[in-house]
Amino acid sequence: MIKEKEYRQRRDLLARKLSKNTMAVVFSATHKVRSNDTEFPFRQNSNFYYLTGFIEDNAILVLVKNKTKYKSILFVHKKDKIQELWNGKRLGTTQAKKHFLVDEVYTSDEFESIFNTHASLYSKLYFDFKTDSPFVDPLKRDFKKFSQYENLAPFVESMRLIKSSAEIDLIKKALQITKDAHHSLMKQNKNDKYEYELQADIEHTFKKNSAFSDAYTSIVAGGNNANTLHYINNNQKLKSQELILIDAGCEYQYYASDITRTIPVNGRFSSEQKEVYDLVLNTQLEVLKAIKIGVKRSKLQKIAINHITKGLVELGVLHGDVKKLIKKEKYKPYYPHGIGHWMGIDVHDECPYLDKKSKELVLKKGMVLTIEPGIYLDKEDKKVPEKYRGIAIRIEDDILITDKGYENLSIEIVKTTQAIESLNLKEI
């Protein structure tokens, strides 16, 4: 659990990054209508949550900074017994003032007047340019009161790159739950089941362990379906001799996990499936060896491309000189994506990959990223030897950068063919 003191420290750090004589405004997420009077499940705006830990809608955080200090102001939805009867209790200003370490608390319907009062005192305005909050309208009307304005989101998102120990603990908890979900599927008799049955089992494991949301829509792709990278239909019957690519991770207290394992429907890999699987696994292990502080993600991608291309030549999928094949990007139909992405409050954490000078960031202690090589051999691709057609393998783990190199946060989720087979129909 993240303590309120840490949220205040984040606000303090953000305030130090801002220019003097400025205002910064961060809006909560809003409810999204599904149809008529029904809504999609509410999920807080990630940057707002990162700075406040507050999970209600109709909320605004304002930082006002003069030459020597800054002040934090939180706006929350007012208490309303009739609305609470329908939609649940609100924290309200009195409890918000007790709970959050902010200087002032007001109701959200006071935002416009208080914002207007402060706007005349400051020269620059920061806010998230992508916000769709209804409270942004008065802010935009008063642009003329400011001589400058700037997008606030990159400041917060760059802070989110480095995880605190409390954040890492939440990610680890998410991964413990995700481990249980993946291991449960590995142990099952999956013959004649449908993809959606496995998805249901995954989500059941998440929820019964207090992870009330998946971090993204689960991919449960049997056979050739796994050659569609973002396959989420999950509605086909599984076939005994095929593989299932399962890309699924839960979100625990707003922190994500992101894991992919590829397992056999009948509990045993064929020799051809093992060949491709071991190529992907060995690629991942080679990439992991190179991870340490100061390394660029592009270097990790080059290692993956080189290892996969060599392997595709050995399998007879590609033909020719490895260096020339890489230069011509002949591997791309079979390995079209990157080696991984940042992960944290969002499964694809909206953090920068380049610095202010557009130079690639190097890995630093406290960063968390996925490492996920893959090979995709579509059954319709006549260039692929027939015995490999329809096979798709991806192996994905969540990696923390440390002083000693890295820590594989998902190391307990088994991934060798032998370990996966040993779990089939057995208790862990």
Image: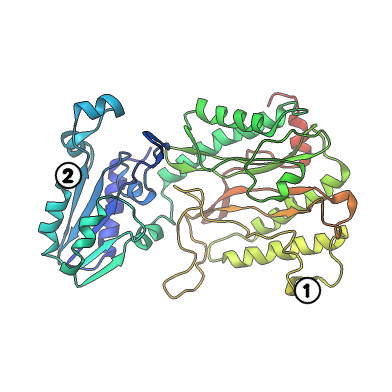
Residue 230 shown left or right of residue 92 in the figure: right
Q: At which x and y percent is residue 379?
A: 82, 50
In the rendered image, the quadrant that contains the N terminus is top left
Dot 1: within a 10 Å radius of its alpha carbon, few (fewer than 14), some, or many (20 or more) residues? few
Which residue type does callout 1 highlight? Lys
Residue drawn 78% across the image and 64% down it? 309
Residue under pointer 1:
323
Disc on res. 287: none
Q: At which x and y percent is residue 224?
A: 76, 46
Please identify the quarter of the rendering in which residue 255 is found.
top left
Please identify the quarter of the rendering in which residue 267 is found.
top right
Residue 294 shown left or right of residue 396 in the figure: left
In the rendered image, the quadrant that contains the C terminus is top right
Residue drawn 63% across the image and 49% down it? 230
Given contact means CB atoms under 8 Å apart, are the residues at marks 1 and 2 in contact?
Answer: no
Which residue type does callout 2 highlight? Asp
Residue 329 against residue 395 in the figure, above or below: below
Residue 207 shown left or right of residue 12 in the figure: right
Under tag 1, what secondary structure? helix
Residue under pointer 2:
109
Determine if residue 148 is in view.
Answer: yes
Residue drawn 15% across the image and 35% down it? 94
Extreme residue toward the front, this view: 36
Point out the frontmost of discs 1 and 2: 2
